[in-house]
Image (tube, helix red, strand yellow):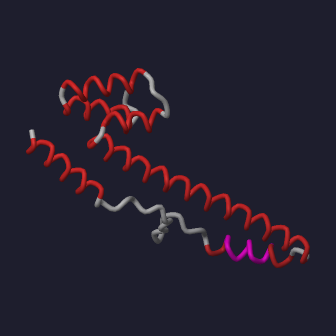
Amino acid sequence: MKKIFSSLVMAAMMISMIPLQSSALVILPGSNEPNPGTVKAAFAEFKSLSKKEQKVRIKEAKKQVKVFQKEKKANKSANVEMWLLIVLAILLPPLAVYLHEGEINGKFWLSILFWFLFIIPGVIYALLVVTNTI
């Protein structure tokens, strides 16, 4: 039993060391690059606007950038939370199920039952609940 538990702990530690997928935007040449002619036309159109209209467009662009950054940050924290729940599902299955569900419900009690019967079914059930496959 100690060998199984120690191997699960080692696997959890190895999984936690895997770097998360970067959310940085990488544009490969030829994939999503805009047409240079289109960019020049857009700059020419922007320069032809009055100073007031240019300021308004710049403000709108800044607002959109802020919204994009908030969404990116929220998505990144969701990935970290998922990894944390997966590690907790391996180490303490009922705690992971409780944190995922946010309340003590039937899934929590079933997780405790599986965990007390044998640890492995509890871990498997918690992983299924945390990853939303049940």
Q: Is residue 4 left or right of residue 113?
A: left
Q: Quadrant of residue 62?
A: bottom right
Q: Which residues are magenta?
A: 38-45
Q: Is residue 48 above or below residue 116?
A: below
Residue closest to the eye, 73 or 110: 110
Q: Quadrant of residue 61?
A: bottom right
Q: Is residue 17 left or right of residue 44?
A: left
Residue visible at 47% across and 71% down in the picture: 29
Residue visible at 14% across and 48% down in the picture: 6
Residue visible at 18% across and 28% down in the picture: 118
Is the magenta region chiefly helix, strand or loop?
Answer: helix
* Residue 103 in picture, x, y percent from top left: 49, 30
Does the magenta run of residues contain 36?
no
Residue visible at 78% across and 64% down in the picture: 60
Does the magenta run of residues contain 42?
yes
Residue closest to the eye, 91 or 130: 91
Q: Is residue 15 above or below residue 47?
A: above
Dividing the image into 4 quarters, which one contains the C terminus? top left
* Residue 95 in picture, x, y percent from top left: 37, 37
Residue closest to the eye, 57 or 96: 96
Residue closest to the eye, 61 or 46: 61
Dividing the image into 4 quarters, which one contains the N terminus? top left
